Amino acid sequence: MIRIGFDVGGSKIAALALDPQGRELARRRRDVPRDYAATRDALAQLAAELVAAHGPAATIGIALPGMIGAGGELIRVVNLPWLEGRPLAADLEQATGCPVALANDANCFALSEAVDGAAAGASVVFGATLGTGVGGGIVVAGRPLAGANAIAGEWGHNPLPLLAPEDGPPVACGCGRSGCIESWLNGRALARDFASLGGRAADGAEIARLAARGDAAARAALARYQRRLATALAGVVNLLDPDVIVLGGGLSALPGLYAEVPQLWRPLIVAPAPRTRLVPARFGAESGLRGAAWLGRSGTPES
Ligand SMILES: [Zn+2]
């Protein structure tokens, strides 16, 4: 029996079939239709193609950006509003005859890493994504946590505490608030810091290259980034006390994070010798899709 995962983003549907050991059998990709019935039918069609090629499916899981309830309710779906309030899981179960589970894409990222990725075997896992946005998902005992408001793990829109004078005033966040963790830790924040320290316009990868060559402004920008990340994650450790924190997203590849941040978070964590491990994602950008395929394995998310 195969497991099918879908990652439905603003423009593309990615589909993946895994064998029971987690080996990839096939993948598909197509545009997202712009209405509910066509999206539902496209997912059913892709599932039918994978079943025809690789045998019957035990489960189907779908990763979606936004607020997805513990029962698969599509409360808010970023860039795909025609899905909101629709019974997608029930309709797809009817079309395919297979159990269907839905979850937020950051939760799927955390699940992928918890099942057979960088946090395999850990009981409590926090998956943090650092990119254009800053998000997160929580997995406890192999099951993603949805939460009462379907926002569990959304640490990116907490205010960042313990700002230093060098940070300057809080800036506006895409959510309408200001001073959010996301606005201090996304790619734009790193570029803004580098520029304010005398650097030119550059993205994270370029700043990392310059730092490796000894550029003082790039090194200072990375040091600020590490300090802020440590402050933000110390709050996660004090609240959730995870065994492992897995970082994903483009900025998770910045140099020094995995050595420096656990040193910097030590004085901010109430435990005398914190054992929480900070590790990079094993499956990188593939993790959301793999986690979707593992969703059925874990049953419905915890509320
Ligand atoms: Zn925000």
Image (cartoon, rainbow, N blue to C red):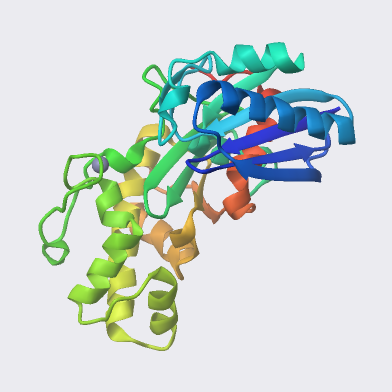
Looking at the image, residue 89 sits to the left or right of residue 57; the answer is left
Q: Where ligand 1 lies, by quadrant?
A: top left
Residue 145 is situated, as x and y percent measured from the top left of the image, at 50, 25
Residue 299 x, y percent position in the rendering:
65, 19
Measured as percent of width and height from the top left, residue 192 is found at 24, 67
Residue 171, percent from left and from top: 16, 53
Task: From the viewer's perspective, tell me whether residue 111 is left or right of residue 11.
Answer: right
The answer, for residue 98, to whether it is visible in the render is no
Picture residue at 78% right of the left edge, 38% below the top = 18
Pick the front one: 190 or 93: 93
- 116 to the left or right of 125: right
Q: Give the vertical position of 242 relative to 257 (above or below).
A: above
Q: Can you say which quadrant of the picture contains the N terminus?
A: top right
Residue at point 44%, 15% (across, down): 85
Q: Is residue 14 above or below residue 262?
A: above
Identity of the residue drawn at 41% across and 55% down: 131
The answer to whether 119 is drawn above or below residue 214 in the figure is: above
Residue at point 26%, 39% (across, down): 158
Image height of 217 relative to 19, above or below: below
23, 254: nearer the viewer: 23
- Would you identify the image quadrant in which residue 201 lies? bottom left
Can residue 47 be seen in the rendering of this structure?
A: yes
Quadrant of the rendered image containing residue 44: top right
Q: How many marks?
A: 0
* Quarter assignment of residue 100: top right
